[in-house]
Amino acid sequence: MDNIYELACEAAAYISTRLPCKPDIALILGSGLGNIAGKIENKVEINYKDIPNFPTSTVKGHEGKIIAGILGGKCVIAMKGRAHYYEGYELWQVTFPIRVFKLMNVGNLIVTNSSGGINRNFKSGDLMLIRDHIGLFAPSVLRGPNDERFGVRFPDMSKVYDPGLLRLARDVAKRIGADIREGVYTFLQGPMYETPSEIKMLEMFGTDAVGMSTVPESTAAAHCGMKVLGISCITNSATSTHKTPLSHEEVLAAAKAAEKVFTEYAIAIISAMEVKDSLTET
């Protein structure tokens, strides 16, 4: 696509005129982690299907709406659900909301997901800060003509997950007494879960958690110059032997069980973040 900028401008203009304040923090809420959206005050809800050019999610647990308002004393814009590569979308569509947020001058992205634990010390319900990622198993989200209005042709990816936000998240975890893990997240295309041989490969690569999202959005956000913080909810152990086949319902149930801790932690992080004119009315 060579007109993504124009399409994103149209979506950004539509969203911006309906917001109660100017957000500097965007959240992408993964499977089963949407409860935090209910904590947003003075909120406005916009269905994805009403936003020009915006991709809609077809997956259970992804409601498909933007919720904007005040959370932790900051103006935020939250995506309750996302589009995935495995749904049949092109990667420019999967990452389209990130480009829209960039044009809305959103400087910070908190991206979350439900993931399988590869690290054998992890258990279901753990929260993991994403220190780095491996995204070699799908086409690059930056493939094709580059638009300098979003970012440079060859962006540095050595610090996709902002060191300052990682330090803040660690400090917040200590302050509230949350036992937070940390590690490397690997993106696989899905929608099938991993084979035993794929799990062995991921272990050899140094993967701590695996999933089907996040890397495309984080890469696009880093390209756009946004600060990114990633949080994974470990919903199952990918390395364990399952007596019954792993299901999406199991993933949603595990995420739901961790939702209270995740919500408290995320709000505490947002409260501690330094943002620009977050409560200025639009």
Image (cartoon, rainbow, N blue to C red):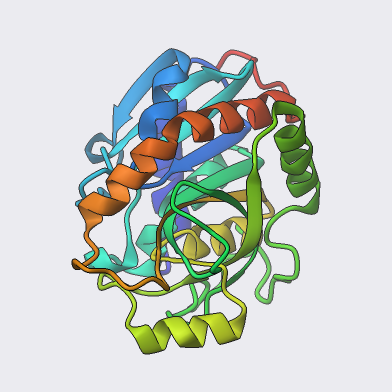
Along the line of sight, the residue nearer the viewer: 257 or 93: 257
Residue at 44% from the left image edge and 48% from the top image edge:
97
Location of residue 240 with respect to 201 vertically, above or below: above
Quarter of the figure with residue 52: top left
Q: Residue furthest top?
A: 42
Is 56 left or right of 182, judged from the image as shown? left
Residue 54 visible (yes or no): no
**Residue at x-position 70% and y-position 27%:** 176
Task: State whether residue 129 is above or below residue 63.
Answer: below
Side (left or right) of 119 relative to 53:
right
Name the quarter where the N terminus is drawn: bottom left
- At 68% from the left edge and 76% from the top edge, which residue is drawn? 154
Q: Is 213 or 152 nearer to us in this picture?
A: 213
Give the percent coordinates (x, y) of residue 140: 49, 77
Is residue 201 shown above or below 112?
A: below
Dividing the image into 4 quarters, which one contains the C terminus?
top right
Is 282 rendered above or below residue 240?
A: above
Residue 234: percent from the left, percent from the top? 46, 54
Write the residue at 49% across / 88% down: 201
Q: Is residue 165 left or right of residue 191?
A: right
Q: How many marks?
A: 0
Q: Is residue 75 visible?
A: yes
Nearest the eye: 170 or 189: 170
Whether residue 4 sits left or right of residue 159 in the image: it is left
x then y, percent, for residue 229:
64, 48
Q: How far across and down, in percent of the image, does residue 35 sit?
A: 38, 29
